[in-house]
Amino acid sequence: MKLPVAILLATLCLHVGDSYRIFVVFPMPGRSHTILGDGVVRHLAAAGHDITYVTPSPKKNVPKNVRQIDVSDNFNHFPTEELNLKRHIEGDTALDISSILGYMLTIHNVTFHNPNVREILVDPNEQFDLVIVEWMFSELYSGFGAILGAPFIWVSTVEPHWMVLQLIDEASSPAFTADIMGSGLPPFSFKERVSQLFTQILIRGIKFFDNSEDKIYSSLAPYFKARGRQQPPLQEIAFNASLMFGNSHVSLGQAMTLPENYKGIGGYHIDSKLPPIPEDLQKVLDNAKHGVIYFSMGSNLKSKDLPDELKKSLLKMFSEIKYTVIWKFEEVLPGVPDNVHIIQWAPQPSILAHPKCVLFITHGGLLSTTETIHYGKPIIGIPVFADQFINVERAVAKGFAKRVDLSMTMADQLKSAINEILQDPKYTTTVKELSFIYHDRPTTPGAELVHWTEHVIKTKGAPHLRSAALAVPFYQKLYLDLLALTVAVLLVIRAVVHRIFKKSSKKEKTQ
Ligand SMILES: *[C@@H]1O[C@H](CO)[C@@H](O)[C@H](O)[C@H]1NC(C)=O
Ligand SMILES: *[C@@H]1O[C@H](CO)[C@@H](O)[C@H](O)[C@H]1NC(C)=O
């Protein structure tokens, strides 16, 4: 008798704090995507909600209220070759937009049909109050909301751009907002402005003519059936999100008009607790006389793919500078100079937070760029793929970065960039100012995430936040109907005038 009572009480207690069941989907097989998904789950679980988390990288120790759905199979469907640094140095980086879209669709397809995911989707006992899904170049994941019969929230992992904004409001203008895949920042030159427009048209064209998205969506029919739901058209649910979380903040990007249901919560992935620093690394940091340069190309791109020649020239260059260098590198290197410390694993936030750290050499991924502003450290960006180019370009334009291109001869450029940044205080001053703007918010990004998530659930999908623009077709926005009407009226007037004129001239003739 006692045990059931205890269970009953425990259940009641949970419900007092309004514990919701939330389905979180971050299935991209890549470290940075996992970090963003983990961040969402960490905040929501800490707020007491029951989380079901679709992830390619399940963790060992998760709180009791987090259930992980393993989609690690997704790693078998992603072209890791594309991430190979060596290929980029050799200039073989041809990943065009069309193949990127193709890879993304494959991940969507295999995620939906993963047996672990299927098990939940077909079970009508699995009920959820909300779905949170990562947007990755397709609207297919809106299907999770429709299948589970719950409102859903998109998470956009980069600065707001036209492809995601059109889902909750309208596409931002290519005349003054940058596409994530391109380069160039507003104000655009004529050529750049045309190229931005062209990118929008090209991507719309590819999506319009490629029917694999529809095919995958049709293959979801059994899920709808299992739950006794009609399958709505993809076009209807794709634009039906309640909210969009953006991994963005004005300190990192550019000020722009955003709809009410876009919430920029850039930086939410950064845990307020710094990971511990191993003792020997702590000593290196504490004892660095001239400051520490932290060098890491992230977790996807392995520095061991660098050609030997390049490794040697980098080590030689580092030996010629007075600063201490901490290089995150996956292999043991011969002939490492005294001021260089190779570490296989790096507690990156803790290194960046250390007062002795003066510079970060990075690929310019958005998470790393966010962390540099969070901790106020200038960077040298060596962009390799995807949004890294535009991130580095933004950082340079904001004045806290220099860009160096990946090449066999980059050591010299890297050296002069290091010297310039560390000898001219303006880079550090600028990044400290941005760091102030970044931190000066009414509340932390994590608290905002929890607040808006609960708001959507409490208001049953937050229809009051939706933009009226979604209901207006393209031709009405451009007043093409008015234009057509005006032209028609003018034509009629012309015809009437013409006829009257003809008649009167005929009369004149006959007189
Ligand atoms: C759109 O979202 C609302 C609120 O979440 C929901 O009630 C409605 O059923 C959704 N429409 C479709 C077609 O899924
Ligand atoms: C989706 O995956 C299934 C296997 O699960 C495969 O048969 C199908 O061709 C895939 N569809 C697309 C469009 O890639």
Image (tube, rainbow, N blue to C red):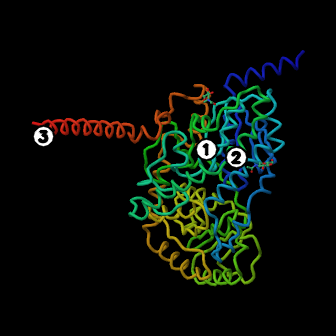
Q: Is residue 82 left or right of residue 401?
A: right
Q: In the rendered image, is residue 352 in sight? A: no
Which corner quadrant holds the N terminus? top right
Q: Is mark 3 within 8 Å of ligand 1?
A: no
Of labels 3 and 2, the one closer to you: 3
Residue in the image at 42% along x and 37% along y: 476
Image quadrant holding the C terminus, namely top left
- Inspect the image, locate mark 3, and give the three-letter code of the amino acid beneath it: Lys
Q: In the rendering, at what x and y percent does residue 95 appear?
A: 64, 65
Check if mark 1's residue and mark 3's residue have beta carbons within 8 Å: no
Q: Secondary structure at mark 1?
A: strand
C-alpha span from label 2 to label 1: 9 Å
Q: Amino acid at mark 2?
A: Phe
SS assignment at label 3: helix
The disc at residue 509 is: 3
Q: Which mark is residue 119?
A: none
Circle nearer the N terminus (3, 2): 2
Residue 298, given in percent of the width and then of the height, sits at: 66, 63
Residue contact between numbered discs 2 and 1, judged by CB atoms under 8 Å: yes
Q: Which residue is mark 2?
A: 26
**Percent x, y of residue 172:** 46, 48
Instruction: Give the labeled residue for mark 1.
Output: 155
Sequence-wise, which precedes: disc 1 or disc 3? 1
Q: Is residue 498 above or below residue 73?
A: above
Spatial separation of the CA atoms under disc 1 and disc 3: 76 Å
Residue 69, quarter of picture: top right
Binning the other alpha carbons within 10 Å of mark 3 as few (below 14), some (14 to 19) or many (20 upward) gives few
Q: Would you place residue 440 above or below residue 241 in this image?
A: below
Q: Say whether residue 239 is left or right of residue 28.
A: left
Report x, y in % for residue 314.
63, 80
Q: Amino acid at mark 1?
A: Val
